[in-house]
């Protein structure tokens, strides 16, 4: 846009300058021919006068004041510091020589231009500013402007020269201005800034709904209960907002339907499982009774895990500012009552999070660390933009090829599904979902000295947007 506006401005100035210069030359051509005919008439008039009358006429002209020409008869040619240049002067000189040659047969007339402050007149070569104002300053000065003075000198007879000075009232006749002057450059800059400013306002008003749509799409992955988009803006953006709100409503309906389905299944399965457990207790064979109860326990654990999965992904709770150190110390105290050992190092400033969800996430990770390694070591660190929580155990670790697969639901590297040997493999998946809902990330890595390290990264700038 900047290049386009500047290109249009420069092109328009170039065309305007060319046209203005051409118009000025046309005006100068017509004016110089008229002045040339007037000078020829003046020369013809003084030729016709007797010698003794010439000075009388000159005195009368000077006494009149305000005449168009300053005329004098001198005994020599007055030296003029010629200031004319360029095509304008060439045009004037050519017109005068052509007119004087055709009207008077004079081919050696001197046509020159002088600045008013350097113009000399009369036999004593006095400066124009030293003469009485009524003699010539009224006709040769245009204060405060200072256009060049046209001076024509022609020989009346030997040692007698007719001196005619006049103005060509054309502004900046020989001023060497570039086609892109400072004034035009300033005007181009003002136009450019105006166009860019208005364009930015227009673009901003058009893209603002897109920004809202982008933020809403980001929030939708973290909170399905986010308020709907305002369906305004350009027609296409408004239509997109309508479609986005419709999609959000459908997703919410599907999630609610899933929760109802899992809750119904879990509720409906509890009753037959309980009846089967009671009947199993009536079996006479102790071995069969124990195996039957173990299978029922496994089935109950699967139902409980499925319901926990649904509740684990449900983050419908308000944001609160909490201390991560206090939360971890509370979990460590609860786990110590069950025989677990948790060591905590480091401090962190309070964060705005969903406390119950984050507590569930950290509890899952700490329980895994204690189950597989006997104890857990937690370190807190922050760098101003994010909080890092590292939880290390002293267990066997996880092969590198399996570290992403363990986040999938119901995936466990330990083959048993007994509730006494590690659950049903939902804890890590739920923990990662909770961390990502807070705009962070959960990664696993084996420690060089043995054991597994789970690292949570919670960015501070995104927590307030959940």
Image (cartoon, rainbow, N blue to C red):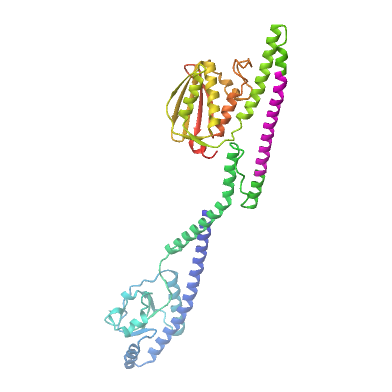
Q: Name the residue located 68 percent from the left edge and 35 percent from the top edge.
A: 254
The answer to which of 304 and 462 lies nearer the viewer is: 304
Asked if the magenta segment contains residue 258, the reply would be yes
Please name the predominant secondary structure of the magenta segment in the image. Answer: helix
- Residue 24 place in picture, x, y as percent: 48, 72
Q: Name the residue located 48 percent from the left edge and 72 percent from the top edge.
A: 25
- Residue 173 place in picture, x, y as percent: 42, 72
Q: Where is residue 48, by image quadrant?
A: bottom left
- Residue 13 place in picture, x, y as percent: 50, 63
Q: Is residue 437 left or right of residue 324?
A: right
Residue 311 visible from this viewpoint? yes
- Residue 185 place in picture, x, y as percent: 45, 61
The answer to which of 295 and 405 lies nearer the viewer is: 295
Q: Where is residue 169, by image quadrant?
A: bottom left
Q: Where is residue 404, by image quadrant?
A: top right
Quarter of the C terminus within the rendering: top right
Which stretch is magenta? 245-274
The answer to which of 278 and 228 lies nearer the viewer is: 278
Height in image: 448 above or below 218? above
The number of discs equals 0
Residue 158 visible from this viewpoint? no
Q: Is residue 58 left or right of residue 329?
A: left
Asked if the magenta segment contains residue 257, the reply would be yes
Q: Is residue 62 left or right of residue 317?
A: left
Q: Name the residue located 44 percent from the left edge and 61 percent from the top edge.
A: 186
Height in image: 295 above or below 319? above
Height in image: 67 above or below 384? below
Height in image: 274 above or below 165? above
The answer to which of 351 and 153 lies nearer the viewer is: 351
Quarter of the N terminus within the rendering: bottom right
């Amino acid at each position: 846009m900047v290049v386009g506006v500047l290109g249009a401005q420069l092109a328009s100035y170039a065309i305007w300058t060319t046209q203005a210069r051409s118009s000025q030359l046309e005006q100068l051509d017509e004016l110089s021919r008229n002045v040339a005919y007037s000078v020829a008439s003046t020369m013809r008039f003084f030729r016709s006068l007797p010698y003794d009358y010439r000075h009388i006429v000159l005195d009368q002209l000077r006494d009149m004041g305000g005449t168009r020409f300053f005329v004098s008869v001198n005994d020599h040619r007055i030296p003029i510091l010629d200031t004319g240049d360029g095509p304008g002067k060439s045009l004037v000189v050519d017109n005068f020589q052509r007119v004087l040659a055709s009207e008077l047969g004079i081919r050696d007339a001197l046509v020159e231009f002088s600045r008013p402050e350097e113009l000399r007149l009369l036999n004593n070569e006095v400066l124009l500013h030293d003469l009485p104002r009524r003699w010539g300053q009224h006709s040769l000065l245009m204060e405060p402007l200072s256009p060049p003075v046209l001076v024509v000198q022609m020989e009346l007879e030997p040692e007698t020269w007719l001196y005619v000075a006049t103005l060509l009232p054309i502004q900046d006749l020989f001023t060497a201005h570039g086609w892109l002057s400072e004034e035009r450059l300033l005007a181009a800059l003002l136009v450019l800034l105006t166009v860019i400013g208005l364009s930015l306002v227009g673009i901003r008003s058009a893209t603002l709904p897109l920004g809202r749509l982008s933020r809403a799409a980001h929030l939708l992955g973290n909170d399905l209960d986010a308020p709907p988009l305002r369906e305004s803006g350009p027609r296409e953006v408004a239509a997109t907002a309508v479609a986005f709100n419709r999609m959000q409503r459908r997703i919410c309906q599907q999630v609610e339907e899933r929760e109802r389905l899992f809750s119904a299944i879990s509720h409906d399965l509890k009753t037959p499982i309980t009846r089967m457990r009671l009947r199993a207790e009536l079996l006479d064979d102790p071995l069969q009774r124990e195996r039957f109860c173990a299978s029922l326990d496994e089935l109950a654990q699967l139902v409980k895990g499925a319901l926990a999965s649904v509740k684990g992904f449900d983050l419908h709770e308000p944001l609160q500012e909490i201390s991560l150190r206090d939360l971890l110390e509370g979990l460590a105290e609860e786990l110590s009552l069950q025989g677990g050992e948790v060591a905590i190092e480091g401090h962190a400033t309070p964060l705005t999070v969903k406390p119950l969800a984050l507590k569930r996430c950290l509890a899952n990770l700490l329980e895994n660390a204690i189950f597989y390694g006997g104890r857990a070591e937690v370190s807190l660190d922050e760098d101003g933009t994010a909080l890092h929580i590292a939880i290390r155990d002293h267990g066997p670790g996880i092969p590198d090829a399996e570290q992403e697969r363990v986040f999938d639901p119901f995936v466990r590297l330990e083959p048993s599904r007994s509730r006494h040997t590690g659950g049903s493999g939902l804890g890590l998946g739920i923990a990662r979902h909770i961390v990502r809902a807070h705009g962070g990330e959960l990664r696993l890595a084996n420690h060089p000295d043995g054991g597994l390290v789970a690292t949570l990264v919670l960015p501070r700038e995104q927590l307030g947007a959940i």
